[in-house]
Amino acid sequence: MSWPILLGLAVGLLLVLLFLGVRVFVGFLILNLIGVLVLIGPRGFGLFTNSLFETATSPSLMTVALFVLMGEVLFRSGSVDILFDSVDRLIGGLRGRLYVVTIGLSTVFGALSGSAVAVAAMLGRSVLPMMEERGYSRRLSAGTILAGASLAPIIPPSLVAILVGSLADVSIAGLLIAGLVPGLLIAGITLAYVLLRMGRADVERPANTTGTARRAALRLSPFLLVIFSVMGMIILGIATPSESAATGVLGALIVAAIFGKLRLGMVMEAVSGAVRTTVVILIIVASAKLFSQLLSFAGATRGLVSMVSDLGLGPELTFLVMMAIPFILCMFIDWLAFMLLAIPIYQPIVTAMDYDPIWFWTLFMINLTVGSMTPPFGYTLFALKGANPSLSTGDIFAAAWPVVGIFLSAMAVLWAAPWLVTILPGLLR
Amino acid sequence: MNAVWRAHDATSQALFALAGVALITATGLYLFEVTARYIFNAPTTWSNEAVQYCLAIIVFGALPEATRGLAHVAIDIVPTSLPPRIAGPLMRFNAALASVACGASAWIATREALRQFDRGLMTNAAHPIPRWWITAIIAFGLASAALHFLRHAADRAR
């Protein structure tokens, strides 16, 4: 059987299983078990076990567990509430200030958490009711929260960056740092959009006036320790990304202690939550790992590269096609499942087209983030709806489209000016 | 039979707790390594390897408990939009299919662990340990998850 038929059958089988509601990791297990039997036979079972073994003992994937733990400590200790109050106070009495607070807060959260779903749920519970109560536009508020939450997988630490880096064999440190400028760019564009779209209803309401701005800045300062523990350690070359995740956990514990919120029960809950999230993510990665080897074995890797070369689309059009596919597919399937399916297929094409890997995979990462907030099936949308059930699905969908536009505009900028992505990773080299 | 299921649940919870200990240990090991390397200029050769084994315990040790709580990611748009008389059997089928997939994977991993044990294979590391130790954790995690999926399928059938 030729590789295009095999690849088509494999992708088709996986999509059917996923749409039937089969657990994502089970879908990949079935795909790989059948793939091994068809392509290699029972003697390939050793390869199957080895792929699980290699993933389960990959030090770079420990970074996922540790970043999740860091976020859990910050959220469960209530340190983020102090962050919210301080940012709220510092923003002051602007018109439509809660929009600005949300974007500012999300940017800082992005540097403290790698999960859009977690930030959307948190902001949906805390900020959105406040915005509604004060008469802010419901759709613009939801859109601002969606945009803000979607900064988390882009601004380091980013779980997506670690997974992409380890699967695509790209520098994880480089990918992590590369997200910083694009994240700030998107935050800036979102802010400009919100300020332009703000209506008369979004008038200024009394600001949080508890405490002085200096006190707010002082209370914000311990969070710099967490950001330094992660990004500073990587940039200074003191720690590897995995080690910096551990120093980030220590930083988060110190912050909790500074605010008097360090309790054994809280730490245990954070560890339990982190283990649960980690196993859910990494079992999918472990189950999918063999797929890339099977693609090579079937000749699909080589075949794809020569097919793309023969099409003669050129690097620009090829790039556009490679970005359009995740944009469309991630509307319907889980971003993690898509990522695990796509990376082995994309990786040889990225090399053949001579794209800068950090630049390409950063844009791919942003694209995945867009996919998870694009109606009808984006995870971030569901997280916001779950956190604030009073929001109608129609409101959330209507709020999401302009945000999708903002992210696509930012991607266009990053495509035209690749140095915005590569400048910081360049400092690591 | 209930005693068997209770023992199965207790084992899953104990392994989940062990996964938590492994996560705390890994955090401590990395912090120790950074301190040893940058403050005492004495990098270790074993901490990174120990962290790797911790990760295997986290992923496959916590797998049964995550499966017991049905915490795994699924795209449930189709099952939740179907009428209950179709969605019920579909969910049952999905759980049974998951049980078969995890069971088959566990069987393959067990055979591989036995082969590694027979041949005395060690990990490729500065401080090698028997490879079957890790493979056995993988096999046990998958087998226990297969049993949980089977129980979910049976529960839905009732």
Image: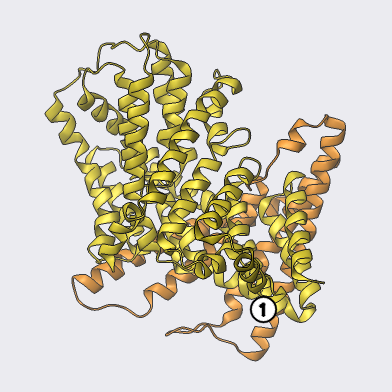
Chain colours: A yellow, B orange
Q: Quadrant of the C terminus of chain A?
A: bottom left
Picture coordinates of residue A304, whole percent (x, y): 65, 67
Q: Is residue A140 above or below residue B112?
A: above
Q: Nearer the viewer, residue A397 or B90?
A: A397
Tell how many labels. 1
| In this rendering, position of residue A81 left or right of residue A342 | left
Residue A210, image quadrant? top left
- The residue depicted at 61 percent of the width and 52 percent of the height is A338
Task: Give the residue at x 47% y 40%.
Answer: A408
Q: Quadrant of the N terminus of chain A?
A: bottom right
The answer to which of B117 and A410 lies nearer the viewer is: A410
Residue B21 in view, yes or no: no
Could you tell whether A202 is left or right of A86 in the image?
Answer: right
Q: Name the chain under label 1.
A: B
Q: Amino acid at mark 1?
A: Ala
Name the spot of residue A335 as percent of width and height, x first.
58, 48
> Which secondary structure lies at badge 1?
helix
| A278 displayed left or right of B104 | left
Indicate the quadrant where residue A421 lies: bottom left
Above or below A42: residue B153? above
Q: Residues within 10 Å of mark 1 (few under 14, many from 20)?
A: many
Q: Where is mark 1, residue-wise?
A: B113
Q: Position of residue A281 (x, y in %)?
A: 56, 53
Q: In this orientation, does residue A180 appear?
A: yes
Which quadrant of the view contains residue A31? bottom right
Q: Residue furthest bottom?
A: B119
A183 shown above or below A148: below
Residue nearest the viewer, comparing A407 with B74:
A407
Answer with left or right where residue B18 lies relative to residue A149.
right
